[in-house]
Image (cartoon, rainbow, N blue to C red):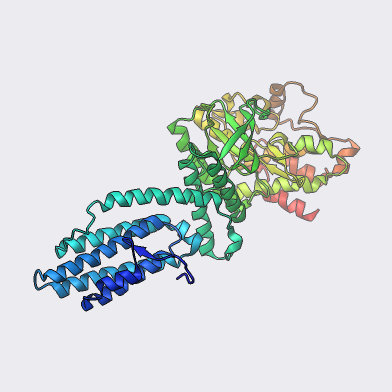
Amino acid sequence: MRTGTTHLLLSLGKSLAQITAELAPVPALFPLVDALCGIIQLCENVAHNRHSARQLCDRCHILVLAMREYQEKAVNDNIVQARNAVLEQLTDIQYKMSEWANLGRLKSLVNQDIIAKDIANCHTQITDCINNFHLTSHFEIHEWMTDFQKNQRLDHAQLLQSLSQLQETTQNVEATTMETNIMMRQMMAMFQKAMGENKQNAAEVHKGLSTNLYRYQSQCKELLPDLHLQSGEVKKIGKNPVRKSSSGMLDIYEGLYLGSERVDIKVIHSMNFDERNIRRFRREAKIWGQVWKRDQGQHIVPFYGFCQMEDEPHPCMISPWQKNGDALAYVKANDLTVDYIKFVGHITRGVAVLHNMNLVHGDIRSLTILVNEKGLPLLSDFRVSKIIEDASAAPLTQSSGMMDKGRYSAPEMFQGDGVLSSATDIYSLAMTILEIMTHKQPYPHIKHHLVASREAYEGKHPQRPTEPEVSRRGLDDGLWKLMVDSWSLDPSKRPSVHAYLEYFAKI
């Protein structure tokens, strides 16, 4: 309860002293008056839902006045029973009001929907009490539901304003507790929902909501509760794509995420953003969340979500921007400073994350590996080729982006409907390691991708490079044997990713 308040606590325009004096001539009502005054005092400490809580106070006041009229008229012999029922109702509301008042600012925000439902239930119970004992009174407001809905709208507007201006973060609470982690995710869900409701309204409020949601997300190290980003979470910067994906199937635009972080907006032109594909992306989003929980962006570029931009009929995927570009460009620019064994070992650990989750990347090569600000290579666009294949209902071999993947793809991917497996990932991983070590694409002496694919199909793997700089970078006998084994035409004879991990652990 607040102390030192300078304003009068009022109900129906009357102070606590006036209410007590007005009802003093009826001693039997003292317990009811005491409970009513307690409710009015507690109401001032309810951090949110203030308008609805005050209306509930007024209706409790009305209930006591109705009981006074009922007692004065001595309508029947049920006076004691009615008085006890009213007292029980007021005591229950006082208990609930005490719970709401003691929640604190953050918990009140998280539980504002629950509080609103509790208040509505209290009104229903008051109505039942009035009807059960025929406590008719000229004080009773029969339009309480209309007033309640009006107060809910006022509370919601105040909620949006509070969320946009909130300065508290997880530093104010014990971030190690399970309760706090759940609460922070609830806060994030509330921010995201509020952004959607406020999308067309005041830009300043939306900016505040975005900023606070990003702060909470950064503190929690979680993806958003809803990865279907339809509340203005992402803004496109510029009208033209900054680059195309390595497969040519994606146009990549620069974007701003929650007004705070630079991101890639990857537009899939071969897909429409219809209900079928939205369901497909929602299924994928669950996998994105699982990978994030396992990896936290250490080896794999996360997907922040999917959406449809206002000027795009196609689905977009959102990923954090990586300042150092793709792996091949990075090692070429930093040849003398890159620790190649550490570099490709980090890539291998990313593959292990996916394979340990029974997931297949499907398109491992230097151009789908991005380098972060720390110089660490991260797998990107995992499962994107599978998404596009499923959406088009065409096998991998008929994909428009498969031709330039031929140098990296296992031969079985071009047979029949094509096959994606951990074994095809291992084949591609070995080709990618070769490309990073040599700074040249596999089969560099062959100009056309189709011819290179035919070489692989016939079991003619790349020749071991003999340049001194390749040896300097770390391509030794042990690593080369692993790579050759990875190019076996028999997928079952290829090593697992754990064989690579064991090799790098010994270096």
Looking at the picture, how far across and down is residue 505, in whole percent?
A: 76, 55
Q: Tell which residue pokes out farthest to the left in this image.
A: 76
Q: Tell which residue pokes out farthest to the bottom in this image.
A: 27
**Nearest to the observer: residue 294 or residue 453:** 294
Looking at the picture, how far across and down is residue 50, in whole percent?
A: 41, 57
**Nearest to the observer: residue 281 or residue 138:** 138
Q: Tell which residue pokes out farthest to the right in this image.
A: 468
Looking at the image, residue 24 sits to the left or right of residue 275; the answer is left
Looking at the picture, how far across and down is residue 279, in whole percent?
A: 45, 37
Looking at the image, residue 472 sits to the left or right of residue 422; the answer is right
* Residue 360 vertical position relative to residue 448 in the rendered view, above or below: below
Give residue 62's quadrant in the image.
bottom left
* Residue 308 vertical position relative to residue 37 in the rendered view, above or below: above
Residue 27 seen anywhere in this rendered image of the structure:
yes
* Residue 80 vertical position relative to residue 283 in the rendered view, above or below: below
Q: Residue at horizontal 26%, vertical 76%?
A: 30
Looking at the image, residue 417 sits to the left or right of residue 452; the answer is left
**Nearest to the observer: residue 204 or residue 487:** 204
**Nearest to the observer: residue 87 or residue 339:** 87
Q: Quadrant of the N terminus?
A: bottom left
Count of all numbered marks drawn on residues in the image? 0
Q: Residue at horizontal 61%, vertical 47%?
A: 355
Residue 357 seen anywhere in this rendered image of the structure:
no
Looking at the picture, how far across and down is residue 318, in whole percent?
A: 59, 38
